[in-house]
Amino acid sequence: MERWRTARADTDDSLPLALASKGTRGTVIDAVNDAAREGGAKAGQKLTDARAICPDLIIEPSDTEGDADWLARLGLWTQRWSPWTAVDGTDGLLLDSTGVSHLFGGEPAMLGDIQRRFDDLGFTSRIAMAPTIGCAWALAHFGERDRMIASSDTLDTMLAPLPVASLRIDSDDVLLLRRLGLKTVGALADIPIVSLARRFREKEESRTNPLHRLEQARGRIEEVVEPLIPQTLYRAAKRVAEPVLYVAILKPILADLAEKLCRKLETAQRGLRRMRFEAFRVDGHIAVLAAETAAVVRTPDHICRLFAERLETLDAGFGFDAFALTALWHEAMPAHQKGLEDDEAEGLSPPHLIDRLSARIGARNVRRPIAYPSHIPERSVVWRPALEQNPPISTLGPERKRPIRLFDHPEPITVIYATPEGPPKRFRWRRKLHDVVKVEGPERIAPEWWRERSTVRLRDYYQIEDEEGRRYWIYRNGLTDDGRGGSPDWFLHGLFA
Amino acid sequence: MHIGATLQEIFAASADASAIGLSLSQIDKQKPAPLLWVQETRVLSDFGRPYIHGLPVSLGTEPIHVTARNAKDALWAMEEGLKCPSLSAVIGEIYGDPRALDFTATRRLAVAAERYGVPAFLVRVGGQADLSGARRRWRVKSQPSVPHPYNPKAPGTPVWSLDLFRARDMRPGQWDAVYDAAAHHLDLVSPICDGAVADGARRYG
């Protein structure tokens, strides 16, 4: 609802408005604004019912996917407070704040900061901090105030007055518990678990078993936040007082982050293979740059250079106010004592060269050939990105003479005059006539019948030289009477030096 | 006489791989190191890509191949490559006369090549010889090959006509050269009586 309102700034808030989507049982309202809520419409209601209660309701289609997308992005954005965040349902975010709050001046100050940031974005937020996920969820959704903090001592007393629905359980379980007269969490907690266990026997394995949920909320059963990023081990973060508007200022910040990260990695004896630079924008967007290296690195300079070329592509908008450099993939890299000669060496090493080329030109454009055991010329080489660690090249290959250049796609040539069943005497390639002076061949290369269709034709390759001494590698695709198509065509496949 | 690591510019005739052959023939085979091969996309689509089974076996090196969108990227990649002393050579192929390829750009390549000791070959396809900082500038064309020892109808060892039209450390001249890929050896076949040629013969001998 609020995302919709920010997108349409001209909306009049005094008119009742609802966002609705089509469900299996007719159109259902997903969200309503304050005016509509006063008029009697509420989320989850059928559209026809709402229309009856509040006739002047304005209906707009809701954008469920967009909401989920936005929530996931917000989830990443909240990593400014904690590296361990997750999306909860359709409208919640979970942050693991263990050991984080002191960075923001204590727990109340951190919650205040979070709420203020969400207010700035135009969202109403309800925030709770508690030793367990269950308790925090219950307080955030059903607590009296929109900012609550529970500690392990006050956990049970704060949970007690909340309705059972706050335990993250299914609606039919809520109904059942209410029928049993158990309306609050406190009432449920007072009853010995064993006596209730039978009622929820068929739900024993389920995650939404009320008893299981109760124990989770009270901290008897451990529950962890499943983070958006599986593991964030090595990360350097930095916040600046004034938002950075100019990309030129990013360089020293990046250098600083790289330095920090490398120091962390050095103590752990690890090196980077893939990393990500994030710049958190004031308005909730994150600009992300990723870089990959061919060999493990732990040199701040090198890391900076991988990003430096692309910093200019970032859109600063209203400015960045927090930055993070995260190691996405790291490998063991023992500390290395510099030899006497190492100091003398100047310039780059090949892996560093590959990193830099890949960073600017693109990993797909920096490649290495690998010999592949096949007789078909174009299959005998596989081009792999140089960033991948390739097996060393094997010099196996055809014993025959091969051209120095090969075309990606063999080019058709028009044969003007040929000896029967033999090489052409004169042909046209790229609008120019060539007279064949010398020929060697044919070298017959049969199709790989075990992987190709039966209509693929064999090739007869000839090495030819024209009147000016240029040497080509041409082939005839098929034979005249092989029953796999009409008369064979000629192609030019490579050039000899 | 050892060929110092520097920038050489080689002008290729169209659809003629002899310029690449000349570049490869000058790479020091004693140094088993990777080769950086930069190609502009236009060259790649018009003249194909290097084929490892056809490269001289004696080089025994695997190239790092870069496909550059334009001449600017190609020149940048070449310069980065030249800063890497453990490469055996840097070959760059550029089509036509792009604006990015001016005297400053070639001069930068030449200086980088000499400073880090990596030979650089700038292969120009369909280009005009404008002002350049290259230390040696060649025009290369294929010539009818040497007769095959066993089969008179077959193409034999390739012959290239070399035209060194500008050079800083030797006298310009023209001569024909035979390249023996197996021995990685460049020979001159029709020596003209000229001091520069004798000099050149010793150079490639």
Image: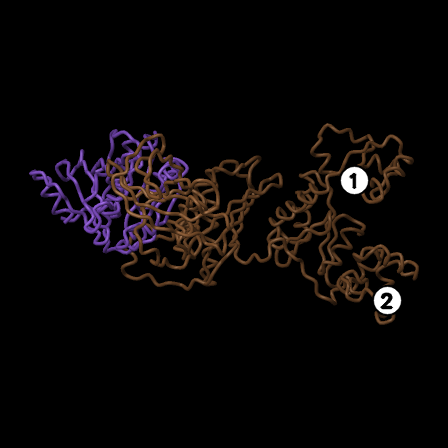
Chain colours: A brown, B purple
Residue A197 disc label: none
Q: Nearer the viewer, residue A408 or A250?
A: A408
Quick check: A398 above or below B162? below
Q: Which residue is mark 2?
A: A190
Q: Looking at the image, which is closer to me, A328 or B23?
A: B23
- Tell which of B20 and A391 is nearer to you: B20
Q: Chain of mark 1?
A: A
Looking at the rendered structure, the secondary structure element under dot 1 is strand
Quick one: label 1, few (<14), some, or many (20+) residues within 10 Å? Answer: some
The quadrant of the rendering that contains the N terminus of chain A is: top right
Q: CA distance from mark 1 to mark 2?
A: 41 Å
The image shows residue A403 at horizontal and vertical percentages of 32, 46
Can you identify the residue that label 1 sits on?
A21
- Residue B86 x %, y %: 30, 53
Whether pointer 1 and pointer 2 mark residues with C-beta atoms closer than 8 Å, the reply is no
Q: Residue B161 occupies which quadrant of the picture?
A: top left
Where does residue A326 sit, x and y in percent of width and height? 52, 52
The three-letter code of the residue at mark 2 reads Asp
Q: Quadrant of residue B77?
A: top left
Label 2 sits on a secondary structure element that is: helix
- Horizontal side, residue B103 vs residue A222: left or right: left
Q: Could one spot residue A361 in this view of the protein?
A: yes
